[in-house]
Image (cartoon, coloured by chain):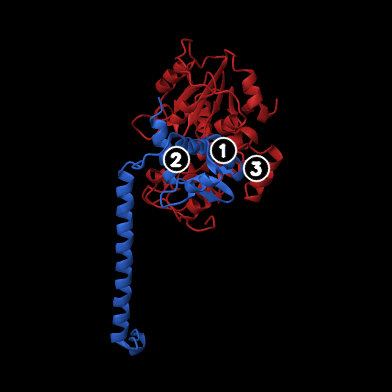
Amino acid sequence: MSRRELSLVDGDWLQERLEDPELVICEVDERPLIYRVGHIPGAHCLDWRVDLQDPVARDLPDGDSIARLWQRIGLGEHSTVVLYGDQSNWHACFAYWLFKLYGVEDLRILDGGRQAWVRQGRPLNREAVPESGRAARVPAAIGERYRARWRDVLAAVEHGTQLLDVRTTAEYRGEVLAEAGYADEGAQRSGHIPGALNVPWDIALDEDGLLLDEDQLRVRLAARGVDLEAPAITYCRIGERSAHTWFVLHELLGVEARNYDGSWVEWGSMIGMPIATGEQPG
Amino acid sequence: MSSSARAQPPEDPEHALASIRSELARIRTAAGRIERGLAELEAGAAASVRARPRPARYLQVLVDVYDLGGRHGVSLEEWARIGAARGYERRGLGGFFTGVRAPLRHFEGRVVLTVFGERLVDEYLAELP
């Protein structure tokens, strides 16, 4: 199977397997309440604010929390997990990245997410999905292979490792702290990490929110100056859009990539961090 | 200190001072206007966004735009289909784009939710059983 087939599925693939007991389907939305409008039959709702974060510290959930989550959704040793969500899978990709950090390999993203499923007129229902009673997989110790911390990023700035800022151009230039509607996600300072290229996450999508094919992805990324043979660290504002680009780079294109989940909210708020503004990487 | 190192005085100190005071007054006026606008926005944000009740189908249209449009909104053709499916005539759809609190706007040939529209969606979803 190709990388793409191992990590990305379409609506036909999923609809044919809705009764598969080894399939664990999870909807991960920016607005979890949209799940109430209707969801893919059997899909569990993961709330990114509750299920995918530590409840107190700004950090990822610990192993015990992940174990409880997997118990709830019935993620067993032989499960295949399919993740999808609104906003072209921002948070679904974050969940994919998180589950991968905890050792799950059989993960798939539904191409186009909720938007594509609804647009294609595929089945939705509003039935509550009960907690799974099956034995859950035990999470591995959280890995750091796909995760970058601020010290890694600082080292990357000093050594010229490829940094990809996947926010909007206005955020990158330092014209705004956050996009409209995300006022609570602003950092203390605006701008970007010196040396970072601006590669907005959505260049990987067509206008219907579906991921481009591999050739198109390579062309678009190269046009933005991305070296697909070199390691990369992605970041955005809180690490969810950059999880999407991480997915594209690492899972679809085989680039050695890490996601900096501290992202701009962390970098732009710490004392003494180097910051560049304007169009140039700096 | 030699005279060559001293900054040259303005040609007309009185005129320069008056000019700076005038500029400062303009800035203060503008700052006041911005502060008032900000206060109004904050007050509006604190109040319910649905001070004026809207019919369910109006809100369902917005949810459809959110659900079908994702991050980039819906095409004009899709927008027309959404409206028709919820019982709106084409002319009636214009109302979604008018006013300070319009829930939708046109952007790069597509129809997208405004921040206010997203808040209406949030309120509608929160009331779903």
Amino acid type at mark 3: Leu
Spot occupied by residue A102 in the image (x, y as percentages of width and height): 49, 24
Amino acid type at mark 1: Ala
Colour red, chain: A
Q: Are marks 3 and 1 on the same chain?
A: no
Residue located beneath label 3 in the image = A228
Judging depth in this view, the residue of B54 and A123 nearest the camera is: B54
Amino acid type at mark 2: Ile
Residue located beneath label 1 in the image = B84
Judging depth in this view, the residue of A166 and A24 nearest the camera is: A24
Judging depth in this view, the residue of B108 and B17 nearest the camera is: B108
Location of the N terminus of chain A (image quadrant):
top right
Q: Residues within 10 Å of mark 3 (few under 14, many from 20)?
A: some
Dot 1: element: helix
- Gap between marks 3 and 2 measured at Cα: 24 Å
Relative vertical location of residue B21 with respect to residue B102 in this rendering, above or below: below
The answer to the question of whether label 2 and label 1 lie on touching residues, with beta carbons closer than 8 A, is no
Colour blue, chain: B
Mark 1 chain:
B
Judging depth in this view, the residue of B89 and A159 nearest the camera is: B89
Spot occupied by residue A146 in the image (x, y as percentages of width and height): 53, 33
Residue located beneath label 2 in the image = A238
Q: Which circle, 3 or 2, is nearer the viewer?
A: 2
